[in-house]
Image (cartoon, helix red, strand yellow):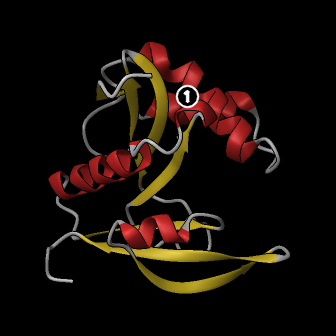
Amino acid sequence: MSDDFRITTIAERPDLAPLVAGWLWEAFWREAGQGLEATRGAVEASAAGDEVPQTFVLLAAGHPVATASLVAGDLDAMPELTPWLAGLFTIPEARGRGHARRLVARVEAAAREAGYAEVWLYTDTAEKLYVRAGWELVERLPHGAGTLSLMRRDLTGEG
């Protein structure tokens, strides 16, 4: 694949919603028991505007290869925290090319544009990726047999 890339949104390209929903369902929600139709509904809900929720899709050489979203809530146990970077996913054959980093930066910019001073995420596998991108570990939370890393990104430029 080429280094030529562009980031679009589901609002701009609603035709990508079924593909993105399939990626997210396979990667995150299938084992969690969420149905594919519910996943597709969540992705399609991000086509409404330019605040929250928003789903971004990275196109490499015109082909969709990665996605990430800005959502109001993503961890039921912490409804007071908002907004969240959620659903960061890159197809296996496009990994290692900086697409995740580009999408994280785009979600941060969208949160900043919407007037937020911080954004949240949780991960059980990619803490190092986010630390390299300037995120801070806030807390480790028990989750099943493992833990989740709750992380925060200050968008004010002060922390």
Asked whether, in this view, residue 128 is left or right of residue 114, the answer is: right
Vertical placement of residue 62 versus 140, above or below: above
Asked whether, in this view, residue 41 is left or right of residue 131, the answer is: right
Front residue of 20/3: it is 3
Asked whether, in this view, residue 38 is left or right of residue 59, the answer is: right
Vertical placement of residue 66 versus 158, above or below: above
Q: Residue at x 47, y 37 (%)?
A: 67
Vertical placement of residue 114 versus 38, above or below: below
Where's residue 90, x and y in %?
A: 54, 39
- Which structural element holds mark 1? helix
Residue 10 visible in the displayed image: no
Answer with the quarter of the image where residue 49 lies: top left
Front residue of 127/33: it is 127
State the residue position of label 1. 20
Where's residue 125, x and y in %?
A: 64, 64
Asked whether, in this view, residue 104 is left or right of residue 140, the answer is: left
Where's residue 30, x and y in %?
A: 78, 41
